[in-house]
Amino acid sequence: MSAPLHVVRAGQGPRCVLVHGSATDHATWTIQFASRLTAEVRLIAYDRRGAGRSPLPDGVPWLTVEEHARDLAGLIDAEGGPAVVVGSSFGGVVALELTRRWPALVRGAVLLEPPLPPSDDQPSSPPGFLEGLDATAAEHGAPAAAERFLRTVLGDDAWGKLPRAFQERSKGFWPQIRGDCHALAAYQVRYAELAAIDVPMLLLGGERSAAYFRPTLEALARSLGRARLDVLKGAGHMMQAEAPRGFHDRLTRFLAELPSP
């Protein structure tokens, strides 16, 4: 039996579950937990299995996207039922799969630049990407591989502006990063099926994010039945931390548009 997920909660009101991306854990939502959002919604963040204080089952090197979505469904059910789900990066992929498999648990979903291909006939990452990370880990160590991953996702400029303590902490997540890369490689978006998802969705991009995120957001906006796309000015891939005011504004407006729980 798997150990319970590590969960943190704050605030009151409708439930809003926050799903972190790679190279981090629930702490990526620290600004949100210290913000006015807690006066409007009940924030629930957790460590995905394989990150932070949520260990993987014995002998399991990584979870698939579908398994992460099942964990998320179980968490929402245990917290009392339907919730708004906000997924950052890989967490956005998990949130998307949750809406596909358990739509009754999702009042609405906010996806922050999920790292998916813009069509089903394209690979999830450039050829040799994971192999290159593994080679870096073998030659220079796991922290160097994690840094290479983060520089690719965030960009050198954004990486360089991160606080040193955050950089060092992020480089400790190499096993989770590698597992998420495997999970993405095994995942199929199945774009033709997305129109059947009858869940309101907000797709958020960062104005300063790497260019390859935008085609995916546009493909999702075209394919999902009830989605709209918005871009946060001045934000990069870590928009919940880089542009929290704009992120909070978009989130609260989206929440206000949803039917009462």
Image (spheres, rainbow, N blue to C red):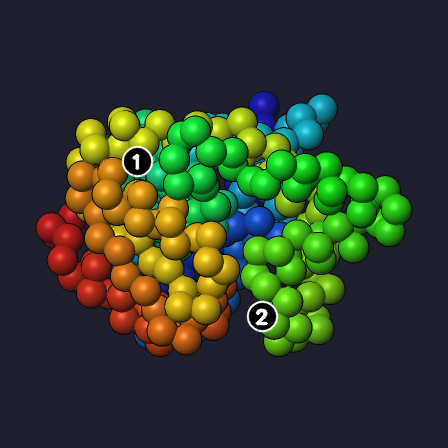
- Crowding near the residue tagged with mark 2, few <14, some 14–19, many ≥20 C-alpha atoms within 10 Å: some
**Residue 7 in the image: above or below residue 179:** below
Tally of numbered discs: 2
Quarter of the figure with residue 251: bottom left
Q: Earlier in the sequence, mark 1 or mark 2?
A: 1
**Please, which residue is most extreme toward the left here?**
259
User: Is 256 in front, or is 88?
Assistant: 88
Q: Residue at position x 43%, y 29% from top?
A: 121
User: Is 125 in front, or is 195?
Assistant: 125
Residue 208 drawn at (x, y percent): 45, 69
Q: Which mark is residue 68?
A: none
Q: Amino acid at mark 2?
A: Ala
Q: Residue at position x 54%, y 43% from top?
A: 48
Q: Is residue 148 left or right of residue 79?
A: right
Residue matched to label 2: 158
Q: Tag 1's secondary structure?
A: helix
User: Is 94 in front, or is 44?
Assistant: 94
User: Is 217 in front, or is 258?
Assistant: 217
Q: Amino acid at mark 1?
A: Thr
Residue 213 drawn at (x, y percent): 44, 53
- Crowding near the residue tagged with mark 1, few <14, some 14–19, many ≥20 C-alpha atoms within 10 Å: many
Residue matched to label 1: 99
Q: Residue at position x 73%, y 64% from top?
A: 168
Q: Is residue 109 visible?
A: no
**Residue 66 in the image: above or below residue 4:** above
